[in-house]
Amino acid sequence: MSTAMIFVGLILSTILATASNSWLLAWLCLELNTLSILPFISKTKHPRAIEAATKYFLTQATASCLLLLAGTSNAWLTGTWDMTQMSNKLTSTTMLIALTMKMGTVPTHFWLPEVLQGSTLLTALLISTWQKIAPMSLLFIMSNNIQPTFTLALGLLSTTFGGWGGMNQTQLRKMMAYSSIANMGWTVSTLTHEPKASMINIFTYIILTTPTFLLMALTSTKTLQNMTTMWSTSPLATTTMTLLLLSTAGLPPLTGFLPKLIIMNELVTQNLTPLATMAMMTSLLSLSFYLRTTYLTTLLNPPSSATSATKWRQKMTKNKTMILLPTATTSTFMMPALIP
C-alpha cells in the first residue's frame, strides 16, 4: 500500500510540474518528485543503493536550490513568478543549469552513472525516462528565453562525453546512463531553435529505453557477460534487444534515426553546419559501444576460450515475451508518417 501511494505521488508530482505556470509551484512539485523516488532507489537495503540515494538527493537538492534562486531572482526583477517572463540572461542561464542538472547533462552529469549503477533495473528505468519529463517540459516552456550559444555548447559537450564515457563500460546500467547523457546532448542542442524537435527526441528516447530496460529486467541481464548468454533465455528477446540497441544508437532506418535526422536538418537550416558535423562525429562514439553490445548479444557462445560460469536466471515465459513484443516492435522500426 505504501509503495502504491509513493508511486502515485511520483506520477502526480510530475503531472503537476508539467502543468504549472509558476516557478514556485514547479519547484514544489519537483521537490515532491525527488522525495517520491528516493524510497525506490534505497529499497534494496544495500550500501551501494544507499550511496546512490544519497548522491541523487544531494544532486537534486543542489539543482532545486539553483532553481529556487533563479525563480526568486526573476520574480524580484520582473514582479511575477510566470515561467514565460525570463527576460534576464543571468536568471535564464541559472534556471537552465538547474534543470539540466536534474536531467544529467554535461557538466553536471557525474551523478547519473553512479546512481543508475546503484539502483535496480526498474528504478534505473524510472530515472532514465520518467524523471526527465518534468524538467524537459519546463525547458520547453522557457525555450524562447534561453541563450542559444549556451545550449549548443552543452549539447556538444554532452554528446562527446556521453560517447566517450560509454566506451569502456561493462555494466549495462552505466552504459545506458552514458547513452542518456549523449541523448540529452542531442535534445539540448536544438532546444532554442526548434523545441518541438527536442521534445520528439526525448520522447523517442523514452519509448526506446522502456522496453530495453524491461527486457534486461526480465532476463536478469546486467553486464556484457550476461548479454552473451541471453540467447539461452529467449531468442526472441535477444533479437528484439539487438534491434532496440541499434535503434537507440540512431542507425537508419530504425526509429532512433528519425529525431537525429530532424535535429541535423534544423542545425543545417540555422547555418550551423560545422556543429552538425561535430555532432554526427560524436554520435559515432555512441554507435561503437552499441555495436559492441549487439555483437555480444548475437553471439551464441561467450567470446572466450576458457569455460566461464554464467549467472542462473529464471526462464522467461512466453506470455512475458509476448507482452514486450508489440511495444518493442513498434518502437524499433521507423514510422513513415513522422518523417518530415
Image (cartoon, rainbow, N blue to C red):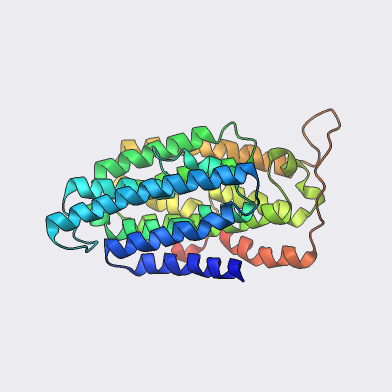
Q: Quadrant of residue 208?
A: bottom right
Q: Residue drawn at (30%, 52%), measured in percent from left and top?
A: 67
Q: Residue drawn at (50%, 36%), measured in percent from left and top?
A: 163
Quarter of the rendering occupied by the N terminus: bottom right
Image coordinates for residue 87, horizontal then vertical, percent: 16, 54
Image coordinates for residue 104, horizontal then vertical, percent: 44, 45
Q: Residue drawn at (61%, 39%), measured in percent from left and top?
A: 291
Q: Quadrant of residue 277?
A: top left
Q: Nearer the viewer, residue 44 or 203?
A: 44
As drawn, 327 above or below 185: below
Q: Nearer the viewer, residue 187 or 127?
A: 127
Q: Nearer the viewer, residue 271 or 226?
A: 226
Q: Quadrant of residue 307?
A: top right
Outermost residue toward the top in this view: 305
Decide if residue 339 is in sight here. no
Quarter of the rendering occupied by the C terminus: bottom left
Image coordinates for residue 16, horizontal then vertical, percent: 38, 69
Residue 92 vs residue 231: left or right? left
Decide if residue 206 is in sight here. yes
Q: How many marks do you count on the picture?
A: 0
Image coordinates for residue 77, horizontal then vertical, percent: 13, 54
Residue 107 vs residue 242: left or right? left
Outermost residue toward the right in this view: 307
